[in-house]
Amino acid sequence: MIVVTGATGNVGRPLTRALAEAGEQVTAVSRHAATVPDGVRHVAADLAEPAGLTPALDGAKALFLLLSGDLHAPEARPADIIGLAAASGVRRVVLLSSQGVATRPLGPSRVAMRAVEDALRESGLDWAVLRPGGFASNALAWAESFRVQGTVAAPFGDVGVPIVDPADIAEVAAACLLNDLHTGGVYELTGPEVITPRQQAETIATALGSPVRFHELTRDEAKAAMTRFVPSELADDTLDILGAPSPAELGISPDVERVLGRAPRPFTDWVARNIAAFR
């Protein structure tokens, strides 16, 4: 059995589906009740209380570990989940980490994530680490304003990074969970092109056949919006990258193609699959 945390999110949902379609027994974990594919077991658990995962891990051979925003806070102890997994007999963990662990190692949230990576390496388990950059699905934050006002608001409108499709992350995660070939791998996951927020908004508008007005937020405005959902440290670390990406953060990684044997999906593909959210 394979346990997928964050199973109702933009990565966890397609990962759960892919594993089930591959014939695996899957336990989907999320904080709240959720609809899951036929044949998939669902367990409600909050990763901030690792002991709540114990029923989900019973009989599991592998775990996909996705940490929600609050588990990036300095006082959180996400490494405890790895210890619980090992004690429960899990043999493999695939961790969704962050590109910033390598590119911004001194950022507070990156220091915390590096500690989780280190705990996994030292656990004695088989492991793989995925380090994506920005997610294409972050554009869903614009859906309501797009529908109601025809407006997109974002900081750093003309600064781009190679955002990655969560479906690609899910496919790489599935490969790492199912194939010993990827044990000990650290994969940086990006899209195939650098794209700015303004260009993303225009891509959505083109797909809809509707105009869009772009409003550029200040950094302070963007941080205020982000800290409704994530710790301040994580918001600052993210905005540092979005506002002034380093050469490494602008690079197109070969790792999606290395694992999947195909190029990563462009933003237009993500838009085509998710355009209903903006109508």
Image: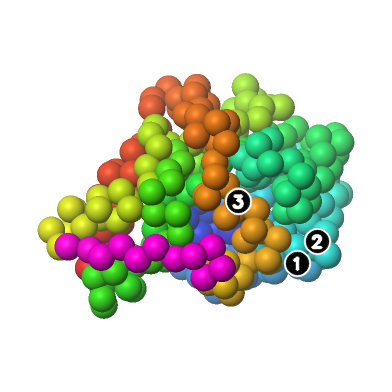
**Disc nearer the start of the sequence (2/1):** 1
Where is mark 1, residue-wise? 48
Mark 2 is surrounded, within 10 Å at the Cα level, by few (under 14), some (14 to 19) or many (20 or more) other residues, namely: some
Q: Is residue 229 left or right of residue 47?
A: left
Image coordinates of residue 40 in percent, x first then y, are 52, 57
Kindly check if marks 3 and 2 are in contact, taking CB atoms under 8 A apart as contact: no
Instruction: Tell me the tag on residue 240.
Output: 3
Q: Residue at x 68, y 41 (%)?
A: 104
154 over 60 or under it: above or below: below
- Under mark 3, the amino acid is Asp
| Picture layout, residue 38 above or below residue 104 | below
Q: Secondary structure at mark 2?
A: loop
**Side of 72 relative to 187 (left or right):** right
Could you tell me how far apart the alpha carbons at marks 3 and 1 are, in whole angstroms?
26 Å
Q: Amino acid at mark 2?
A: Pro
Q: Which residues are magenta?
A: 211-221
Would you call the spot at circle 1 few (<14 residues within 10 Å), some (14-19), or many (20 or more)?
Answer: some
Q: Which residue is painted at 66% across and 27% down in the image? A: 185
Q: Nearer the viewer, residue 232 or 207?
A: 232
* Mark 2–mark 1 distance (CA, rounded to whole Å): 12 Å
Q: Is residue 126 above or below residue 101?
A: above
Residue tagged 2: 74
Left or right: where does residue 48 sit relative to residue 145? right
- SS at badge 1: loop
